[in-house]
Image (cartoon, grey):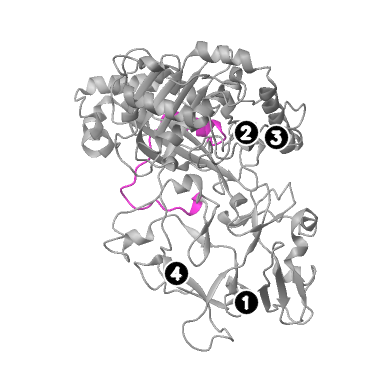
Amino acid sequence: MATNHFRRVGAARPSHLMYTTGVGALVDLPNFSVLVRGLDDWNYAHPGWETIAEPRLLAAVRALGGRSVTELRPAPWLEGTDRDPQGPAARIGVPTMPFPGWLRCTVCDELAPLDSGVFGFENLKARKPHEARFFHTNCPRKKTGRKPLAVPARFVLACTAGHLDDFPYPQFVHHGGDCPKASHPRLRMDDRGGNLGANVEILCLSCGGRRNMREVLGQRGAEKLPQCRGRRPHLADFDPDGCRRGQLKLLVVGASNQWFAQTLSALAVPKTGASELQTKVEQHWAVLEKLPSREFLPFARETVPTLREFEKWPDDDELWAAIERQRCGPRPDDDGAIYPDLRTPEWEVFTAAGSLPATDDFTLRRDPDGVPARLKGFFSDVVQVERLREVRALVGFTRLDAPDPDDPDLVTRAPLARSAPTWVPASEVRGEGIFLRVSDDLLDGWVRRVTSSPAMLAHREAYGRFRRNRYSDRITGEFDEMRLWPGERYLALHTLSHLLIRTIALECGYSSASLSERIYAGTDGDPRGGILIYTAVPDAEGTLGGLVSLAEPEALVRLTRRALADALHCSSDPLCAERLPHFPEEFLHGAACHACLFVSETTCERGNRFLDRRFVVPIDDPDLALFPELP
């Protein structure tokens, strides 16, 4: 790579590190692609950054295997890039490396590795990092003008253990051997197009050998791929334990299954009945727990910026008493987390009787008149969440297989660092929301009606097939295919949530991709029935109020009626309305499609699974509908 370049080659929002461009992910830039490096290479040497305080989430991260983790850190960033694009701020960010390590000239199709000296790099405009590019230094077909662009070679190799590697083009074209004419043969990649999949030929210019990539495509072609070397390019090493899976799969650069984030998220909710002071102490415990005695409080108030939030409590004795209560209470330790269930504290707060103290992170409000009269048979409680803060942490990633949200150990999680990390990347979002609680009696009666229905049995059987096909070969001992079945309540509540989200997006000013859901669906022993729909727009302080205003009585009636009325029909009916999974199908939705229920992947907490309109509104059998009539 040329020495005359700027380090900044692109930009991304902090939330992208949680969803699409985190550690180990391939990121497509305008002219080439890069791989996000591991946490060992992240630089937090610059002053001014602070950790993200959320004790419940930190405890959950530790419980998931990160026992060495003590901090949640935001993405490294320094203000001033716009003013001085060549200054210190331009050199602060998430570290990346070019990947794959093979490039192809767009004019002559020469194929060579980055370290061959065939290609150069330029990034000459500090204010236009998107113009950074690789170029072919001595292209035989380009005699004048700007040197031709070199782009990443199309293919990489990956395995389900999280390893990623370059495709071995020289060995491939020579059928596993060496070129008889040269130790470092010159190669060319010819894309011949066609309508029957990839038709890319690799040609050795030194010996004349040639081979088409079609030979390694598909299930039969995978048998011709080499065994996995256990390469971890984001950590710049090879797995010391090797690769237990061994079998590689061919991927095209930019494939959506090359990286799946494994994240945890929590709302910064106060403990039920806790005072505002105690809540603040809990949020800033990473700083406060280091204070050895009360005598250090005056000095800490003056020197530690985060303690300015305690100006409302000038009495040091009162603050120290709250610190001692937190210190004496249960804390995360090496044996696990004190909050393994992140949803229970949130459910308790949303359903708690009386009012909770309003804070900058969490403020609830209930209408004095309660649920609107026309919705009494639909909801038992409506809560306006005027302020909330969601914190999300990246704990690992997988390749080829997405992690299961309820059983993360079923898919091999790739590490974020070479050694046990002491921190993980995190991001926080401030926004607003609406919490709707469905009557327990209504849900219980509905569950009794549909549990043994053919439609619900079809969903349960499809879930069993899904689990068997995906996980049965990874579990030792007895395999319980229904162990993590979310339950009938979840299907109804999840479907209702999607109906409301699609309707809300038309009225509140936020796009549907800016909204998120949290479903609180219990079981027979722990009956819950609630939906939280909230904004998930990154880098936004406070709220706009457009979502909360839809919880006002008149607006909520209109919103609910429109959502349920729209659910009665779909532009894909009757195909959509009649859909149910039957053997051998394993899709986990019924009457649901992109035209009526599906939302973006960042909005849905279960990847558009467990959805069926027939369980909410009467599209065929009225007995299956949770709401047989409109409000």
The mark that comes first in sequence, 4 or 2, is 4
- The amino acid type found where label 4 is placed reads Ala
Q: Secondary structure at mark 4?
A: loop
Q: On the rendered structure, is 360 left or right of 246? A: left
The secondary element bearing badge 3 is classed as helix
Foreground mark, 3 or 4, reads 3
Give the magenta part as a residue range.
39-67
Q: Nearest the camera: 404 or 504?
A: 504
Q: Amino acid at mark 3?
A: Phe
Q: Amino acid at mark 2?
A: His
> Mark 3 — residue?
466
466 in relation to 269, above or below = below
Disc 4 residue crowd, few under 14, some 14–19, many 20+, Cα 10 Å: many
Q: Answer few, some or many: residues within 10 Å of disc 1's Cα (few below 14, many 20 plus, some between 14 and 19).
A: many
- Between the residue at mark 1 and the residue at mark 4, the CA separation in whole angstroms equals 20 Å
Q: Quick check: marks 3 and 4 in contact, CB under 8 Å? A: no
The residue to which callout 2 is attached is 589
The kind of secondary structure element at disc 2 is: loop
The residue nearer to you, when weighing 24 against 424, is 24
Q: Which residue is disc 1 drawn over?
A: 109
Q: Earlier in the sequence, mark 1 or mark 3?
A: 1
